[in-house]
Image (cartoon, rainbow, N blue to C red):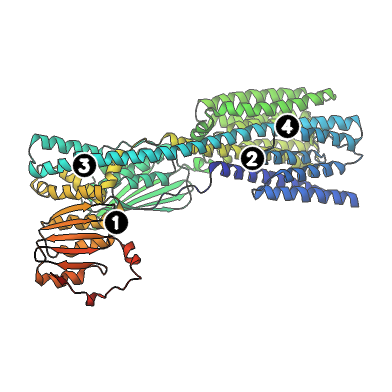
Amino acid sequence: MEGTSRPTRAIAASVERGLHIAIGVVILAKTTVFAASLTERASYDAGDVALSLAVVGCVGLAGVRCVLGRPGRVDVLLCTLAMVAGALLHQGSTPRAGAADSPIIHLVEPMLLVLAARLPAATVLALAGLYVLLRWETGGSAIALRYGVQEAAFIAGTVLAVFVLVGLMRRTSARAEEALRAEGARQAAAGDRAEVEATAFVHDDLVPALLSVASLPRAEPTLAAATAALDGLTTQAPVPSRAPLADQLRAVADSSGLDVVLVVRGRRAVVPEDVRDALVGAVREALRNVARHSGGHRATITLTQRAGRVRLTVEDDGVGFVVTPGVGLRVAVTGRVEAAGGTARVASTPGAGTVVTLDWRAHRIARLLGLSSDNDTFARAAVGRPGRAALRVCGVLVAGYAASGLLLAFDGVRQPATWAGAAAVSVLVVLLARRIDRGPVSVGPLVLGALVPAAVLATVLPTVSVDGLGGLESWIVEFTALPAMVLAWTSSLRVVALLLVPNAVVIACVALQAGLPAADLPHLLFVQPLNTFFVAVIIGVCRRAGLVLAGIGATPDCDRAGATRGLLGPLLPEVERTLAKPTCIETAAGAAVLAHAVRDCLYLPGPAHLALREELHQLRRTGTHVVVNLHDPLAASATLASAVAVLRAVAPGRVTLSGTGTRASLVVVPAVSAAAADAVTAALPRTWVATFDPDATLLAGPPGELEVAAVAGCEVSPPGDRRPAHG
């Protein structure tokens, strides 16, 4: 059975790593844009070159360290030095507020590093104050001071909004990590409780029911006991889970009582919750049919995942069938998958086993956009009401944008069309936030989130002056990205990117028609996707933490039935057949032997002792009365199983198995005949010794393969030199 993998890194650490990468990418992208703008200068002097190299070097080093996951106070200092150098590049000049050549780009970088280094929010305000002083000092006028205040309010508002969002992300991840620790302890306790209850059920109900079938198969108490025991084995209500498909299949395989090999191919595919439940339920029923009807106890599950497609096969090497599949396959397998939009095929050949194939393909548009109800589910698990969380973040952003707009108004820049457009976008943001709080978003709100901002831009941007298009006067460009940031809570990154396409088309057309220099166009187009991408990454981290929380919320408390089925292992099909037909002569005759085999599962549990349990079961079928009397649990029993297998050829009357974890013995009564003594001795495992007395025979040695290695340093006689010791 494939083991379940465990996370190697804590959730909080993974969240911080993702945040560092996102911040590092944004910083490096802004530095690249700045470096590209340097190549378009008409002339250079030594001072400008030195300052430019200082900016690129300091910020580049800090960005690389952030991507590598090692941001700290020194990186904030580096970016602050770069901000100073960037402001000194414009000594004696006064670039317009927010323009492509304004030092505002250098204010963003140290503020983002403050988030990565987990410094107080007051540091953001301190950096903003320093920037205003630099703008005033380098510009040397009241205009430069006003521009610095406008830009600082604009950027500080944006960064503080991200600060709120990052805080939400960190709290969500911490909550998920704490929930994981609590769930681990709870699952351990639930597993222990399930094992205790399963052991009690086997000992108190199942074994007595089988013995009753063997002695009084037609008695009314026997029929009632058999029915109750069968219900205890088969009644297993599956609990919905939002764990990945592969993890759910592992859980189903573990609880099937079969020897199942799970093969997973391809990367994880996005599968709707109803489809995932249908596939898992169909596999559960297919394995149940293997256990009941195939005559074998082995199966192979193959999960192949591609973009927008999942294929599952369940194969067994049992007896197969030629008749039409029964109700279980038609309804619980084929019908269940087809009802979820997939297909199912059952192929079987007598003597060659059965193959059940389940296929599901996403619709092309849904696959292209990455639409899935899981985004909505995980967002709600992370923050409860994603719409309200979106409004909080957007509220801080709106405050920053509005402050900049008011400062522009005090400076004499009247923008009635911009304010009207901002009001329309604000109403849309509130409506979208309330809509995502009510449930998964349909296509209609997505269309509104794409077209309304584009229409606002098409109306407002022509009223902005050409110089203002490249500066802070065009703050409506960043404002119209807010609807996409709201929808990012429950939509994929691909959907969010498509929402911004109409905006980009309108911005480019208006700017080119107004005569904006081509060098300033990337600066205008770069703003929306970069900011939205950064926010969407943080939201995505929140949703991943929500995945953990949603999966924990759906975990069953105690699966006693599953623990019982796992305890019985390959005996499960035979036990179910015996309990289902207690009056059948064939099943009643072997019920006593089966009861002892089931009891062996209590003393020799788990797959490590499967071979020994099977050998004891086969020995009982020869008519031998086997008594198991182990003082300590065995760590391994492969060598002991080989020793038991030797006795099947002599069909003894009674065999008593006893011993400890390091040495086991088999007492055979009556003794093995002299004619068979040499054959028994020659067939025994290398580390076992046979002692023959007239009344009994004693076989003794280490029970497991580990003990064989332990005695490797001792002198052991070769098989030909071992002679029976006759009493």
The residue drawn where x is 57% and y is 39% is 541
Residue that label 1 marks? 661
**How many other residues sit within 10 Å of disc 1, few (<14), some (14-19) or many (≥20)?**
some
Observer-nearest of 417 and 691: 691
Observer-nearest of 48 and 706: 706
Percent across and percent down for residue 348 are 26, 53
Mark 4 to mark 1: distance in Å? 64 Å
Q: Is residue 324 left or right of residue 440?
A: left
Residue that label 3 marks? 203
Residue that label 4 marks? 122
Q: Amino acid at mark 4?
A: Ala
Q: Amino acid at mark 1?
A: Gly
Residue that label 2 marks? 533
Q: Amino acid at mark 3?
A: His
For the residues carrying marks 4 and 3, which lies nearer the camera in this image? 3
Mark 3 to mark 1: distance in Å? 23 Å
Q: Tell me which numbered mark, 2 or 4, is placed earlier along the sequence.
A: 4
Secondary structure of the residue carrying tag 2 is helix
Percent across and percent down for residue 479 are 69, 30
Secondary structure of the residue carrying tag 1 is loop
Q: Residues at badges 4 and 1 in contact (C-beta under 8 Å)?
A: no
Residue 553 falls in image quadrant: top left
Q: Tell me which numbered mark, 4 or 1, is placed earlier along the sequence.
A: 4
Residue 662 falls in image quadrant: bottom left
Q: Amino acid at mark 2?
A: Phe
Percent across and percent down for residue 5 are 44, 49
**How many other residues sit within 10 Å of disc 3, few (<14), some (14-19) or many (≥20)?**
some
Mark 4 to mark 3: distance in Å? 66 Å
Q: Tell me which numbered mark, 3 or 1, is placed earlier along the sequence.
A: 3
